[in-house]
Image (cartoon, grey):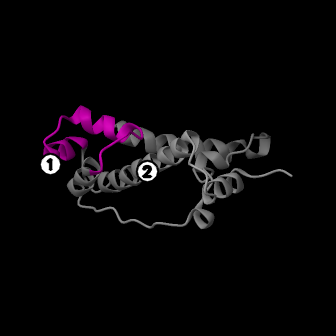
């Protein structure tokens, strides 16, 4: 019987066994990624309205390089830091806590994850999707 990662995680965590380092590491990384994704989404939205990294840095009393590091990739940010960054963008994080057996999402929701190997007729769509994703990344690094 083949078990999906969702089944394995759900079964292992719902038992009375101690959590493994691998389980904790996986969910910690997912949590950091979700926080980073939320901050980045808000920054890109606010950037389209005129917010710059320099403005964000001034609001937080930080160097612009620090803002770039925070927005570049998921990191082990303190909750206070996340709160300050969001507040400087005039946002607040809201939480939705879900039981593991109901809410384990697979990491396949990124638009690049949906790309399949291209064939001649499909190549144009794949290029457009990749361009759109890379433009988001370029937009982040433009300031």
Q: What residue would you read off at disc 1?
A: 59
Percent coordinates x, y for residue 50 in the rendering: 25, 52
| Secondary structure beneath label 2 | helix
Of 56 and 25, the residue lying toward us: 25
Residue wearing tag 2? 37
Horizontal and vertical percent for residue 114? 66, 49
Residue 33, percent from left and from top: 46, 47
In the rendered view, tell whether residue 81 sits above or below residue 45: above
Q: Residue at x 56, y 48 (%)?
A: 19
90 or 134: which is nearer to us? 90
Residue 11 is labelled as: none
What residue is drawn where x is 58% and y is 62%? 100
Residues under numbered marks 1 and 2 in contact, where contact means CB atoms less than 8 Å apart: no
SS for callout 1: helix
The answer to which of 79 and 118 lies nearer the viewer is 79
Give the side of residue 23 with respect to residue 37, left or right.
right
Q: Which residues are magenta?
A: 53-79
* Above-or-below relation of 91 to 23: below
Q: Is residue 68 magenta?
A: yes
Image quadrant occupied by the C terminus = top left
Q: From the viewer's perspective, is 92 left or right of 61?
A: right
Q: Residue at x 43, y 46 (%)?
A: 32
Q: Quadrant of residue 14?
A: bottom right
User: Where in the figure is residue 18, as x and y percent of width and height?
Assistant: 57, 49
The dominant secondary structure in magenta is helix
Left or right of residue 18, residue 137 in this image? left
The answer to which of marks 1 and 2 sits earlier in the sequence is 2
Q: Is residue 143 visible?
A: no
Q: Nearer the viewer, residue 30 or 133?
A: 30
* Label 1: few (<14), some (14–19) or many (≥20) C-alpha neighbours in 10 Å: some
**Residue 65 is a magenta residue:** yes
Q: In this rendering, is residue 119 above or below 102?
A: above
């Amino acid at each position: 019987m083949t078990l999906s990662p969702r089944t394995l995680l759900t079964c292992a965590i719902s038992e009375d066994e101690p959590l493994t380092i691998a389980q904790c590491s996986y969910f910690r990384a997912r949590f950091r990624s979700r926080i980073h994704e939320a901050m980045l989404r808000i920054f890109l939205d606010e950037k389209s309205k005129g917010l710059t990294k320099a403005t964000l840095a001034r609001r937080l009393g930080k160097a612009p390089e620090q803002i770039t590091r925070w927005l570049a990739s998921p990191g082990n940010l303190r909750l206070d830091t996340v709160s300050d960054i969001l507040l400087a963008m005039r946002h607040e994080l809201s939480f939705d806590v879900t039981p593991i057996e109901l809410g384990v999402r697979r990491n396949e929701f990124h638009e690049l994850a949906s790309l399949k190997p291209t064939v001649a007729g499909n190549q144009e769509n794949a290029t457009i999707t990749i361009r759109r994703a890379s433009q988001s990344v370029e937009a982040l690094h433009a300031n």
